[in-house]
Amino acid sequence: MTDYQNSQIDESLLAKELYAPLPTSRQLFTHSMNAIAFAFTALALIPLISILWEIIKRGFSSLRPEMFVNSVIDYGLGNAITGTITVVMIGSIFSLPIGILTGIFLAEFSQVNPASQFVRFITTILTGVPSIIVGIFAYGVIVLVTKGFSAVAGGFALAVLMLPIVILTTEEALKLVPKDQRLASAALGGTRFQTTFRIVITAALPAITTGILLAIARAAGETAPLIFTALFSLDWSPGLLSPTASLPVLIFNLYNDPDPEKNQLVWTTAIVLLGLVICVSLISRLITSKKKI
């Protein structure tokens, strides 16, 4: 028998082994593990579904279009929605440029520099700092200096919370870009600056955008930092340097209010806030599903 025939026999035996059904014991083990995984997933979903059901059941019945243009003093949500968008935008203005540039520096220009390792270490620590501590820090830095609560102070507090998320997601997104793209750009005469900002960032943009949206979603739901900085207002805020209402603080302040209409407003606010966070999360999912690195 020739070597060719022997190789053909070996390949056929290998193919038979690869496509042979698993033993009964292996199949039983696989199905058992799948059943356990689905069972624990269902247990994890029970609290989430119960919370969602309670919020929808209590808040949806009182949701009316005029609530989006009236202030809290008129049993509306308009000023709280505007305030939430305002403080999140201020936080984004503070955190996004610094966070993205820092992530680019860590991933592309200073991988083994001791300074970059220190920055990465501090950034990792910041991700675990409780939000109320960030609120106290912003209170000492902004509120005590300006002698007043304001949307700017609230935005600064949210920026501190958003910053580590933006830095780490930007760094990881850039690391996922294949090295071949960098080499190809260098082979065509591109400088390191051109390669980074024209090739690498372009390829990593969907993942970076996802990190930004997740940071915004987290900031939109924060309560503790805004209690110490933006405080609250029942009516429309006159400016960025005045106390500003927000959806999370509205829920915190009015939950135990004896007025039944204001108490009902809490559940309606929860639906709106939940909808905003879900919309931002869905947008991030759509961005990553359309284009991946």
Image (cartoon, rainbow, N blue to C red):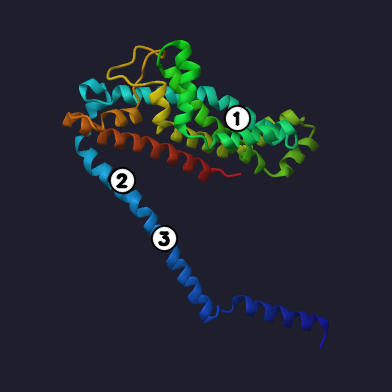
3 or 1: mark nearer the eye: 3
Q: Residue at x 43, y 41 (%)?
A: 282
The amino acid type of the residue labelled 2 equals Leu
- Work out which residue is located at the far right of the displayed protein and give it: 2
Residue bearing mark 1: 100
Q: Residues within 10 Å of mark 2 (few under 14, many from 20)?
A: some
Q: Amino acid at mark 1?
A: Ile
Residue 3, x across and y down, in percent: 82, 82
Residue 260 at x, y percent in the picture: 16, 32
Task: Give the image location of residue 241, x and y in percent.
Answer: 41, 12
Label 3 is placed on what type of residue? Phe
Whichever of labels 2 and 3 marks the residue nearer the N terminus, that label is 3
Q: For mark 1, give the secondary structure.
A: helix
Quadrant assignment, res 272: top left
Identify the image quadrant of residue 262.
top left
Q: Residue at x 59, y 25 (%)?
A: 98
Give the number of the mark in front: 2 or 3. 3
Of helix, strand and loop, which one carries label 3? helix
Pointer 3 residue: 40
Query: Are the residues flagged by discs 2 and 1 in contact, CB closer than 8 Å?
Result: no
Foreground of the two, 176 or 146? 146
Q: Residue at x 45, y 17 (%)?
A: 152
Residue density around tag 1, few if under 14, some if 14–19, many if 20 or more, within 10 Å: many
Q: Is residue 113 left or right of residue 58?
A: right
Depth check: give the residue in front, 92 or 133.
133
Position of the C terminus, as image quadrant, is top right
Q: Which mark is residue 52?
A: 2
Spatial distance from mark 3 to mark 1, Cα to Cα? 37 Å
